[in-house]
Amino acid sequence: MTLFTTNWAHPIKATVVALAVLTTGCAATTKSIDPSEETVHYDANYDFSDKKEIVNKLTDSLLNTTLMGRETGKPIIVTYGISNETAEHINTGGISDDIRLALIQAGEYRFVNRKQRDNTLKEADFQYAGFVPPEQRITEGRQLGANYILAGTLRSIEKNQPRQWRLNKRKLVYYSLNLEMTNIQTGEISWADSVEIARESSRPIIGW
Amino acid sequence: MFSSLRHRAALLCAAVLLQGCAVGGSLYDARTQFYSGQPQAALNTLNTEKVSSRNRLLAHLDHGLIAHTAGEYEESINAFKAATALLNKIDFVGIREQSASLVTNDWVTSYKGEYSERLWIHTFQMMNFLLLNNPEGAAVEARQALKVYTEHGDALKNDWYSRTLMAMSFAAAGKTDSAHIEYKKLLDEIGRDAGVARRAWQNAKRLGREQDAKEFKKVLTSKASAAAKKGELVLFVQTGSIPRKVAGEIFLDPELFASFPVYPDIRRANAELSVLADNSNQSVDVVTTQLVDVSRKALAARGKQIAAKQILRIAAKKELARALEKRADGFGGLITAALFITEQADTRSWETLPAQLSLVQIPLDAGTHDIKLIVRTGSRQYEVSIPKVDIRSREITYHSVRVGSGAPRLVTKTASTDQTGSQSNW
């Protein structure tokens, strides 16, 4: 017993200490990441860091376009979303929502809410159905008419390393997001820009 | 006494090792519930009970398919997404599992799915997204299916159903050019109508590819209406259940044999399908795939890999047996016996799959129709009623039906569907 408590070279004790040291790395951990500060990529696929990069670049481009100078007032925009032409289920609504948010906060553009159009009509119908006093009803025919449609396409090209003797499998993924603003009156594409992201990832073929 | 203990230990060891050679527990229960026409009970089992990590892919596959059959398309999408994520995660050679499988069998490894099963994940996902009126999601799955097909095309090229569905998914998402490429590849390979030519021709005309449209029209034998104003009902029909893999065995000498998975060679005629709309016979286009034919080819494509592993295993076991037989206490003989008892082919597979997938395309006038699907399989006949189906001009309405083995009483959420006809293991 004395030997067990005092002799650190005892094999059982040494094993317990070694296990304790080794398993400290096995504990589950959670930490918060600030998406505006950190860029995190676990693999080659699209992630929130990419979304942040895309939103920042396209918002900057839209805020610095000469389009602003040509308009007498703030341009009124309706968004028709970003179509996903990649092989991944990417919620592109998040990209268009963030671009719209950044532009609204910058105060240079005005937006009409297409997604709420049916609901605004329902609400107007409700107000005029006799439930709301006349002085509190909205005035019909005063909705904003958009000058521009903002829409885009997200595409990807993926290449896997050819089959050969190797210890790692490499994958190259290229994403491009094209965004364009179309003048509703003339049909002209008044502004367009794109963001490209290319990334290579590698993962071992053999593991435990 | 000591020797007896050792004998017992050896027998226990063999028993424990053999225990892994079956898909037991919740997976077995869920499959049994599914095949007795209770998909909701099967989903409950899969949602609440644990499945061993090496069979987790099978659990996701069964979950996705059973949820699809029960009309729970969102749940099905999530299960198949989990299957795809798991496949990406376990896509490496695990030294621990492979070493263990060299002295036992492949049942101790994580099931990674045949190439055909990997393709069918996306086939069912395309159906799910189309049924949920999400063509963009279906097109994403079509691109993923195309990746699997590009990698293992030789084994999968006769899956006309999945390939037509890829083209249809592209077309539904407005990618008529991508759809055209897939239709063209398909018709070039089949060389006959096969239920695809009308769609391919209409798509080529829409795209302004006059030359290709002429080529497609040459093989067009469909009697189904191609009038542009019509709407269309597309039925995803799943009939029967896919045969299970069985163990094939080769005896190399009286004490040595190799066991490997094979699909039984049972010839089956295609199920015949016909459709009545408002009690009137309809001309339909049908694209059909017998899944076992594709599975057999996909398994054969892994043949070299399976054979190489088998040779390694036989060599390892023989060497181990030789070393143990030198022991005088008889213990070696028992361990040797245990090594050869554990020689079992890995016959795991996605067993809830149907035997046949059929894409039934029915051009219909806009309006509400009462549909009756009649399926003949040998001497048996099934009738599935799908009442009050809304068809819109120039639009496609999708509906999924499972008939025969694995068919639930209620097939979809949108329309009550009942089946008459004898239930069997067809």
Image (cartoon, rainbow, N blue to C red):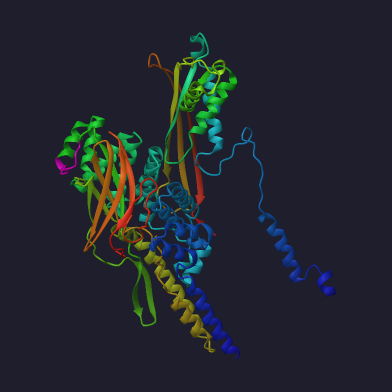
The answer to which quarter of the image holds residue B346 is bottom left
Whether residue B32 is visible here, answered yes or no, is yes
Q: Nearer the viewer, residue A70 or A135?
A: A135
**Magenta stretch containing residue B225, yes or no?**
yes
Residue A66 shows in the view: no
Residue at 28% x, 33% y is B393
Is B287 positioned to the left or the right of B40 in the image? left
Dominant secondary structure, magenta: loop
Residue A153 falls left or right of residue B380: right
Question: Residue B194 placed where, x, y %?
Answer: 21, 48
User: Which residue corresponds to the image point at 16% horizontal and 35% vertical from the top-left?
Assistant: B214
Image: B277 above or below B365: below
Q: Where, by quadrant of the figure, is residue A42 drawn?
A: top right
Asked whether B371 falls inside the magenta stretch, the response is no
Question: Which region is colored magenta?
Answer: B218-226
- Relative to the observer, which residue lies in front, B379 or B304? B379
